[in-house]
Amino acid sequence: MSDMDNSSFIATTSAPVVAQATPSDPVPAKDLRNEPAKERNASLWSDAVRELVRNPAFMISLAYILLMVSMAIVPKLWTSKDPTICDIKQSKVSPFTGDHLLGTSVNGCDYWSHIVYGVRPSLLIALLATFGITFLGVTLGVLSGFFGGWVDAIVSRIADMIYSLPYLLGALVFLTVMRKSELMTRSQNSQVIVIAVVLVILGWVGVTRIMRGSVLAAKNLDFVHAAKALGATNSRIMFRHILPNAIAPVIVVATIALGSFIAAEATLTFLGAGLQAPAVSWGVMIAGHIQYFFEYPYLVLVPCAFLVGTVLSFILMGDALRDALDPKLR
């Protein structure tokens, strides 16, 4: 057999071997474009949950927050006394005296009942404000980062104007104007809503900027380009592909913002622009008893201790979430 015949024989006999499918063949294009993003997102959150469960600081903070939430939802589970029923004859009774666990206020009100019932307005303001800045910040951040151009320019300029206004000063001015214009009545619910709205107006900028940066980083990933190539609409790309992969930093910021808003409410109340009596809150307790600090320090230290514990718990939870959701910090 000639050399040409031998080469032809080898080529024909070896061809089927080359054509056989092997496990190392490339994955179909559909799997490359869709599956990796879903698996990576699920893996990120599952790993984060395992990290959080093993973090003692996060678990202790979560237990404390759940304790405060139970006080806000079911206060009668923690005290049988009405905070509005006071006896001036028992004014400024020391803690652990008689049937008053934490003593009494200057008006003879049970101080423990004020602590328990004071959780609800502070926590409600923080929840409303956090939900507001998260919804507004995520929406504007996604639109600004995804579309860019004039949308990004308008959102950025509005954010710059809000950011240029000092946070505390702006809140004091807004709340003072609303109180003098009688838009903020003495009703506790009215005060809670107005304070939450003011905090949202001044606090959405940070969330928007963080969300915009996350969207800018996520919209250039391969699975987003694959979704565009498959004909997905802009809304589907933004809210089904980009948002789940860019929301993690916002969750961390929102957790920390909960504690910051509780502290902001107490600060505004102490300065006379927040909640007003007969509303019951930790800020009202501190503002109403600061003049008695040297004679009866427990009247200020007790609400301050619960305030610091709650704010610190949210901050520790936010730090733990940041570490758990960022693989580079593990």
Image (cartoon, rainbow, N blue to C red):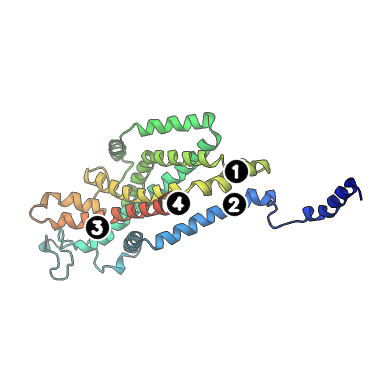
The percent coordinates of residue 233 (x first, y second) are 64, 42
Mark number for residue 195?
Answer: none
Relative to 179, say whether 160 is above or below: above
Packing grade of label 2 (10 A; few <14, some 14-19, many >=20) is: few
User: If you read the primary sequence from the N terminus, does the residue marked by circle 1 or circle 4 appear first?
Assistant: 1
User: If you read the primary sequence from the N terminus, does the residue marked by circle 1 or circle 3 appear first?
Assistant: 1
The percent coordinates of residue 17 (x first, y second) are 79, 56
Residue furthest bottom in the image = 98
Camera-side residue of 1 and 109 = 1
Q: Is residue 104 visible?
A: yes
Compute the Cα span from label 1 to label 3: 48 Å
Locate residue 169: give its quadrant.
Answer: top left
CB under 8 Å between callouts 1 and 4? no
The percent coordinates of residue 185 (x first, y second) are 31, 46
Three-letter amino acid code at disc 1? Asp
Q: In what element is the residue under mark 3?
A: helix
CB under 8 Å between callouts 1 and 3? no
Residue pointed to by mark 2 = 36
Side (left or right) of 216 relative to 237? left
Residue pointed to by mark 3 = 306
Compute the Cα span from label 3 to label 2: 45 Å
Q: In what element is the residue under mark 1?
A: helix
Three-letter amino acid code at disc 4? Pro
Residue pointed to by mark 4 = 327
User: If you read the primary sequence from the N terminus, does the residue marked by circle 4 or circle 3 appear first?
Assistant: 3
Three-letter amino acid code at disc 2? Pro
Three-letter amino acid code at disc 3? Phe
Camera-side residue of 149 and 58 = 58
Residue furthest right in the image = 1
User: If you read the primary sequence from the N terminus, does the residue marked by circle 1 or circle 2 appear first?
Assistant: 2
